[in-house]
Image (cartoon, rainbow, N blue to C red):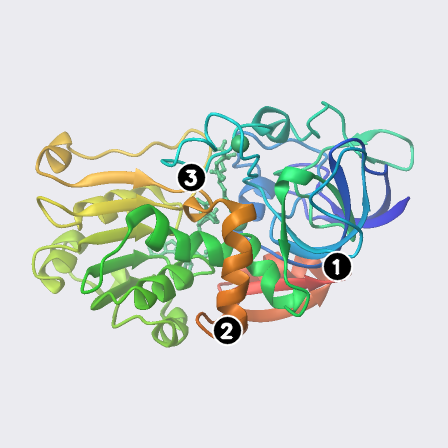
Amino acid sequence: MDVRAAVAWKAGEPLSIETVNLEGPRAFEVLVEIKATGICHTDEFTRSGADPEGIFPAILGHEGAGIVREVGKGVTSLKPGDHVIPLYTPECRECEYCLNPKTNLCQKIRTTQGAGLMPDGSSRFTTKDGDPIFHYMGTSTFANFTVVPEIALAKVREDAPFDKICYIGCGVTTGIGAVINTAKVEPGSKVIVFGLGGIGLNVLQGARLVGADMIVGVDLNPAKKEMAERFGMTHFVNPAEVEGDLVAYLVNLTKGGADYTFDATGNVGVMRTALESAHKGWGESIIIGVAGAGQEISTRPFQLVTGRSWRGTAFGGARGRTDVPKIVDWYMDGKIEIDPMITHTMPLDEINTGFDLMHQGKSIRSVVLY
Ligand code: NAD
Ligand code: AHE
Ligand code: ZN
Ligand code: ZN
């Protein structure tokens, strides 16, 4: 079938909106009509060429929501008409990783997914000339129709609005999940969040949800302060306005360091600051941001010797098919907020504007509506 897609032809170039071919679902695959998709900084990370796994031409996008239109042979858990959120972290419920409660990183299809292919090693997208176009994160939501493995789809309630719940496909779940699943922040904790963008704001609301006492937000863009306060930030720090050492400032502000710190910037220098502003003896620092090819983190081992721990999280430690429908319920029940974070919406034809707004620091989430 013909589908409208934003194609990333080459690293660093704007996306090109065109009609491409999509083959129907093969065994254990599902055709989904995408109704809305957010633009996450990770899409920009890959588009820019910073992603060591980046592969072109590809159809990016991993924060979508839509409706099942057709199922391939062997699909038993979904049927046409079901509302779904594609999962870049699938949940097969039978691999070694799914059977280990310590991780959410299902590895059943990770190799082919990372190579931009469906689990059978081929692509469903082709150009008008029949040349393959790669999938991205197994989801490729920057197209009005996409094919996704059954194990990479969460079935969600039908009264939830696509233009909001698409954000649960990455940002909301990642931020809230980092607090609840990965760090397991306790009530009364002191928390520092670095980067108050689409992920950081959700870390803030996760911290508020679990009853953290002091929630410090750190961002170079002062325009992020107002929205961050709305999501639970109690203290704002702009590193550009701190005289002297930022770590010392934050340790002083939190009276010894934070119980939990989170990097939601992807900057390796910030990651070090986050680790070192965690409390001696017990502070934990969680890396959420993804760093460009070739970048590495460093600190003095003494920081770990003296009781700080450095950890990371992917998709907020969530097991998508199990947890995502629950987060949709939290949103529908008013337990968490999403609407104010969706600052811009646009048709697919204007998707590059969404990337521009991200660069300019003017948006939290831009959502493409099909
Ligand atoms: P974003 O662009 O919306 O937000 C980033 C924020 O960081 C901005 O507000 C920016 O002003 C701030 N910032 C940048 N440099 C800074 C610095 N040196 N000090 C303080 N603040 C700084 O991006 P996002 O969509 O929120 O994504 C954030 C990061 O999380 C990205 O690296 C993204 O790739 C990553 N991410 C990871 C996961 C995961 O599963 N681990 C999921 C989603 C996104
Ligand atoms: N491909 C990159 C890593 C990108 C990355 O870390 N992705 C996160 C999700 S970011 C969503 O916005 C993730 O889930 N990682 C786990 C995984 O298996 O990819 C690189 O550096 O190679
Ligand atoms: Zn993302
Ligand atoms: Zn699995």
> Residue 184 placed where, x, y %?
28, 51
Does the residue tagged 3 have its C-beta within 8 Å of any atom of ligand 2?
A: yes
Check disc 1 and report the residue beneath it.
348
How far apart are labels 3 and 1 at the CA level?
27 Å
Check disc 2 and report the residue beneath it.
333
Q: In terms of image quadrants, where is residue 37?
A: bottom right
Of labels 1 and 2, earlier in sequence is 2
Of labels 2 and 3, earlier in sequence is 3
Q: Mark 2 is on which residue type?
A: Asp
Q: Mark 1 is on which residue type?
A: Leu
Check disc 3 and report the residue beneath it.
291
Note whether residue 362 is visible.
Answer: no
Q: Identify which residue is drawn at 48% across, 33% down.
A: 98
Tell me if mark 2 has few (under 14), some (14-19) or many (20+) residues whose alpha carbon lies within 10 angstroms of its own.
few
Badge 1 element: helix
Tell me if mark 1 has few (under 14), some (14-19) or many (20+) residues whose alpha carbon lies within 10 angstroms of its own.
many
Q: In terms of image quadrants, where is residue 175?
A: bottom left
| In the displayed structure image, the side of residue 88 where residue 100 appears, left or right | left
Nearer to us of marks 2 and 3 is 2
